[in-house]
Amino acid sequence: MKIAIIGASGFIGSNLKLFLSKFNYDITIISLRLAKYNFNANNFDVIINLAGKAHDTNNISNSSEYFNVNTKLCNRIFDSFLSSNAIKFITISSIKAVSDFSENNFITENTFEAPSSIYGRSKLAADKYILNHSLNSFKKFYILRPAMVYGLGNKGNLNLLYNFVTKSRFWPLSAFINKRSFCYVDNLCYTINELIIQHNIESGIYNIADDDTISTNQIISIISDITGKKIYFISIPKKIIKLLFYFGGILKSKYNSILLKKITENYLVSNRKITAAIGNNMPYKTNVELFKTFISFRG
């Protein structure tokens, strides 16, 4: 089977290449430049689109950058797929295309889509384009919306959290009791491979997340176990914490209100639709893979 992976230089792409290399696939890596100007989907059976501009939590990116890559480029790749002999199209969207926060309810594929960030809106625009232009096609398409993806070598907000905890003996945010969904990168890769090899899974949107959820306080305990450093959980009133992070945003610090929400609020993503379609639960568990991820941060 001939597979094209577009935009494979990032964290997800490097892990996906490694994961799929275990199988007997003929894999071609397509650069973003080639995908933009001269991509021919006729040469492949499956098109996997990983091209995207990541969410900028500092809000310094131009909005046109998001729509040029996350929307327009994705649309162009999908158009090439529709006019080709390829039979499956898999694209990585984001759960942020639905909402930046889930409050107390699980986000499902039926949750009303109301993204507040430009990043989320650019992903949603591409999702809508695919849905609207595939009505009369017999081809299979899969829009994957993963929760926050993590794994060995990932340097996102989990790395910030790890560095903060290892530099202090105190965890001042223990008053925030939450539950969050994450997506281990190999659970995402496993899902993509199942969509490649299984032929009876219906086209559509699928949320991707680990089966289990975890609280931030539990994550701090994992970091404490790894470092061998006793962490004292301090319950500072939430109002004071929110005020401090608010001023951090004014001062352009990485410790701002957006980061506080990412760390402390509920963000629950249901993966029931995809696990039912695949016929299996996700093979990797959050607490085990977070443990390995934090060990990789230790170097």
Image (cartoon, rainbow, N blue to C red):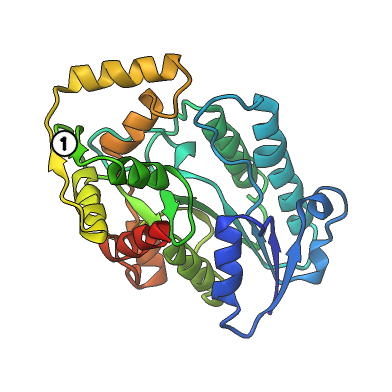
**Would you say 36 lies left or right of 113 here?**
right
| Residue pictured at 83% horizontal, 57% vertical | 39
Query: From the viewer's perspective, is 214 left or right of 144?
Result: left
Q: Please state, as top left, top right, bottom left or bottom right, where the N terminus lies in the image.
A: bottom right
Q: Is residue 180 above or below residue 26?
A: above
Q: Is residue 118 visible?
A: yes
Task: Give the percent coordinates (x, y) of residue 131.
Answer: 59, 45
Screen quadrant of the C terminus:
bottom left
Expressed as whole percent of the image width and height from the top left, the position of residue 105 reads 25, 39
Name, please, the residue furthest toward the bottom.
24
Element type where label 1 sits in the image: loop
Q: Amino acid at mark 1?
A: Ser
Residue that appears at 26% across and 60% down? 226
Query: Could you say where residue 192 lies in the image, as x and y percent from the top left?
Result: 52, 66
The residue that label 1 is drawn on is: 174
Question: Image point 16% across, 36% down: which residue?
Answer: 174
Residue at the spot x=67%, y=39% of the render? Answer: 71
